[in-house]
Amino acid sequence: MQDRNFDDIAEKFARNIYGTTKGQLRQEILWQDLDVLLPTLPPRPLRVLDAGGGEGQTAIRMARRGHHVTLCDLSSEMLTRAKLACAEQGVSDNMRFIHCAAQDVGQHLESPVDLILFHAVLEWVSDPQAVLKALWDVLAPGGALSLMFYNANGLLMHNMVAGNFAYVQQGMPKRKKRTLSPDFPRNPDDVYQWLEQIGWTITGKTGVRVFHDYLREKHRQRDEFETLLALETRYCRQEPFISMGRYIHVTARKPENQG
C-alpha cells in the first residue's frame, strides 16, 4: 500500500482546503497553539522541519519569523507551489526544499531539528507508526512535535449529522480514489498511544473545527466567522470537544535525555 501523492489533485487541494473557511480556521487555531509552543524552545532561529508541508503555508510563516525551515513533500507539484509562494513572500533564503516522503527525510538532514511540523499527513500514510518513529529520529533532544491529524470521531459525527446512516453502518469506506477525504482517518487514542510508545511526552491536545463543519446553515461559516472563531477558541482545548474536532492538534516533546 502506497502513501498518497497529491500531484494529481494539487490545484483541487489548494482551492478546497486553503481557499475556504475550513483552512482559515485550521490555521487560526494551529497558530494559537504554536504561539504558546515556540517560546518554550531555544531563543534563537530554530531548525524547523515541515514534513509533508504541501504548499508551505505554515512554513512561510515560520520562515518570516526568522527560523530556518526545511520543507519536504512527496508531491513535486506541491513543492513547486511552495517554492513559488516562498519567493513571492520573500522568505526563500530561510527555506530548503526536499522532494521525498516524510519517513525518508532523515537521509537528507545534516543535523537534528528543533521543531517538527507534521500537519494533515498521518491520515494519508499506510504505516503511521513508522513515520512517527522516523520523525523522532531526526528531532533533537528537548525538541517539539506539532502533529495535526484527521480525526475518525469527527468523520463519524459529520456523517451522522448529515444522516448518512447506511454509510456509517458500512464502516465509512472511501468511495473515490481522487477525493480529498483521507485514506486513513485516525482514532485519537491510537495516535496518543503510538506517540507515548515511541517516547514522546504529550504536552497539549486541541480540537480543530469542533463546531464549524457541523453547522446546518453553512453560510454562517463565512458570514459569522469571527464569532465562530471565538467560540471554537473557547471550547477547543477541553473535552468532549477535543475528541469531536475534524482534526486534532497534538503537541509533544522529546525528553532532553533521549538521544
Image: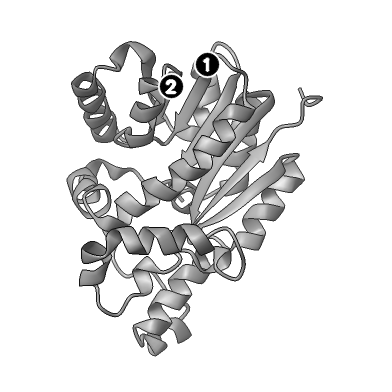
Dot 1 or dot 2, earlier in sequence: 2
> Horizontal and vertical percent for residue 214?
37, 74
Using the image as rendered, state which of residue 213 and residue 163 is in the foreground: 213
Label 1, residues with CA under 10 Å away: few <14, some 14-19, many ≥20: few
Q: What residue did someone put label 1 on?
A: 109
Q: Quadrant of the C terminus?
A: top right
Q: Are dots 1 and 2 in contact, CB under 8 Å?
A: yes
Using the rendered image of the protein, determine whether residue 180 is visible from the camera's viewpoint: no
| Residue at horizontal 29 percent and vertical 29 percent from the top | 79
Q: What residue did someone put label 2 on?
A: 70
Total labels: the figure holds 2
Q: Could you tell me the amino acid type at mark 1?
A: Leu
| Residue at horizontal 37 percent and vertical 14 percent from the top | 94
| Residue at horizontal 40 percent and vertical 26 percent from the top | 71
**Badge 1 element:** loop
**Badge 2 element:** strand
Left or right position of 252 against 159: right
Using the image as rendered, state which of residue 52 and residue 217 is in the foreground: 217
> Horizontal and vertical percent for residue 173?
41, 72
